[in-house]
Amino acid sequence: MIVSAVQSAPVFLDATATTEKVVSLIGRAAGQDAQLVVFPETFLPGYPAWLSVTDGASFDSPQQKAAYAAYLEAAVEADGPLMNRIVEAARDHGAFVYLGFAERGNRHARHSIYCSLAAIHPERGLVGVHRKLVPTYEERLVWSNGDGHGLKVHEWGGFRLGGLNCWENWMPLPRQVLYELGENIHVAVWPGSSELTADISKFIALESRSYVVSAGGLLAAPDIPDDFPLKAEVVERGLGSCCTGGTRILSPSGRILAMVPDGEEGIAVAEVSLQRIGRARHNYDPAGHYSRPDVLRVRVDGRRMETLEFVEV
């Protein structure tokens, strides 16, 4: 099977325009015979990169409040028309798609945002939405805590695919859950930075004896629209090492099979083989012959966490 990882910048906070870019990039990847297309963390409609450079924790800042409101307005519903447009593109091109998106809560949490990873099957549509368990550091200023509901693997092309958002990839237990579920292609999505992606992507490949498809995003100050409340501050201070790429695909032995240079838009493409996974697991299988379930086990609460529950008396 051919797999791919997209390194690109969104049309920041323009969900409709970014959706069309997603559709176009799926087509480009499929044109290179890719049957798996992976996009960066919250690619739709963008990563909240302003937080770390504009005193995002300022409690009563009118500008920070306005920035959050703009981000909330741009967030996407998992069952909304924009996601349906991407589902159609996945179907049309016969590709399984992992897409990081800022998910607007539904039902009781309409004014909350989750860092989510959508798993889109080309025949079955949206088969999973994993909400990031713990937003990292200042991300907690805009994203809500996720849950275990989306910790699943999905079968495609004879492989079992699983994915995590950014620093979740550093968390041993979520990784182990996916290993226990039989994952053999691990999807890791990031806002973009080789400093974050390089070491842990190689480690996951070596630990899991799986392929790793690691997609990092791009974003620069000029990408921020002029009407964004904190545009001037972002331009003045820059975004540092955030959102500079780091996209790569690794073999089960940790070797880089394909990558996109930092700072450049592009698509990494590589061929993966089930036989290669079998060979890699000859001497180590973290959820099989090199595990001790009589000593160590992982328990997962797979419920979608809601703030309201009625119990019949």
Image (spheres, rainbow, N blue to C red):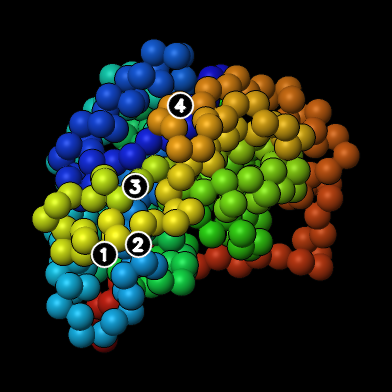
Q: In the picture, which quadrant includes the N terminus?
A: top right
Cα distance in 3D space between marks 2 and 1: 6 Å
Labels 3 and 1: the sequence-earlier one: 3
Relative height, residue 115 to residue 81 (above, below): below
The residues bearing labels 4 and 1 have C-alpha atoms spaced at a distance of: 31 Å
Number of other residues with Cα within 10 Å of mark 3, as a class: few under 14, some 14 to 19, many 20 or more: some
Number of marks drawn = 4
Q: Which residue is mark 3?
A: 220
Q: Residue at x 74, y 25 (%)?
A: 276
Please say if the residues under marks 4 and 1 sit with CB atoms less than 8 Å apart: no
CA distance for labels 4 and 2: 29 Å
Q: CA distance from mark 3 to mark 1?
A: 13 Å
Where residue 80 sits: x, y (%)?
17, 46
Looking at marks 4 and 2 on the same chain, the residue that comes earlier in the sequence is marked by: 2
User: Which tag, 2 or 3, sits closer to the chain's start?
Assistant: 3
* Lower position in the chain sequence, tag 4 or tag 1: 1
In x, y percent, where is residue 113?
27, 64
Residue underneath mark 1:
233
Q: Amino acid at mark 2?
A: Arg
* Residue denoted by label 4: 267
Q: Quadrant of the C terminus?
A: bottom left
Q: CA distance from mark 2 to mark 3?
A: 11 Å
Disc 1, SS: helix
